[in-house]
Image: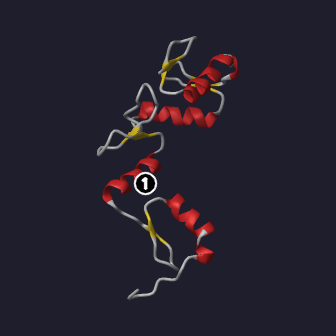
Amino acid sequence: MQSCKVCHKPFANVYRLQRHMISHDESLQRRKFKCNECDKAFKFKHHLKEHKRIHSGEKPFVCPNCQRPYKCMECPKAFKHKHHLTEHKRLHSGEKPFQCCKCLKRFSHSGSYSQHMNHRYSYCKPYREGK
């Protein structure tokens, strides 16, 4: 586990620590979008809008270490975005809502389906019943 030398916040890996260190380089004056409910300020309006969801209760759970508010109830995984949790939950349920119309292969993630359609569709074998 790595920790910030400035604020001593712990991080699971070096990448997250490096991303965090950027926050210490910027002055608060450059962060013109300030939250009226806490002391946080943001450089971009859409970051403030995302942050405010925590106060409204739309993002009720926020892990203090990884900032992942959408927690899976089946396993310990948590996600930053609700749609990532939705796709992850399909691994537990076995649901595969995306299907290739040519070979009929099914996918639980839209990204896997898109990759198949963009790179494999042209040479995937058509589905034939009984084979």
Q: Identify the residue at horizontal 52%, vertical 23% (top origin).
A: 36
Vertical placement of residue 115 versus 9, above or below: below
Secondary structure at numbered mark 1: helix
* Residue 29 rendering spot, x and y as whole percentages: 69, 17
Vertical placement of residue 117 versus 130, above or below: above
* Residue 87 rendering spot, x and y as whole percentages: 43, 54
Query: Image quadrant of residue 75?
Result: top left
The outermost residue toward the left is 74
Vertical placement of residue 74 versus 47, above or below: below
Tag 1: amino acid = Glu
Q: Identify the residue at horizontal 42%, vertical 66% (top origin).
A: 97
Q: Residues within 10 Å of mark 1 (few under 14, many from 20)?
A: some
The outermost residue toward the right is 30
The C terminus lies in which quarter of the figure?
A: bottom left
- Give the residue pinned by disc 1: 87
Vertical placement of residue 118 versus 76, above or below: below
> Is 110 or 46 nearer to us in this picture?
110
How is colour applied across the structure in the image?
secondary structure
Image side of residue 47 versus residue 54, left or right: right
Image side of residue 66 versus residue 19, left or right: left
* Residue 79 rendering spot, x and y as whole percentages: 44, 41
Image side of residue 64 versus residue 51, left or right: left
Q: Identify the residue at horizontal 41%, vertical 48% (top origin).
A: 85
Q: Identify the residue at horizontal 56%, vertical 64% (top origin).
A: 114
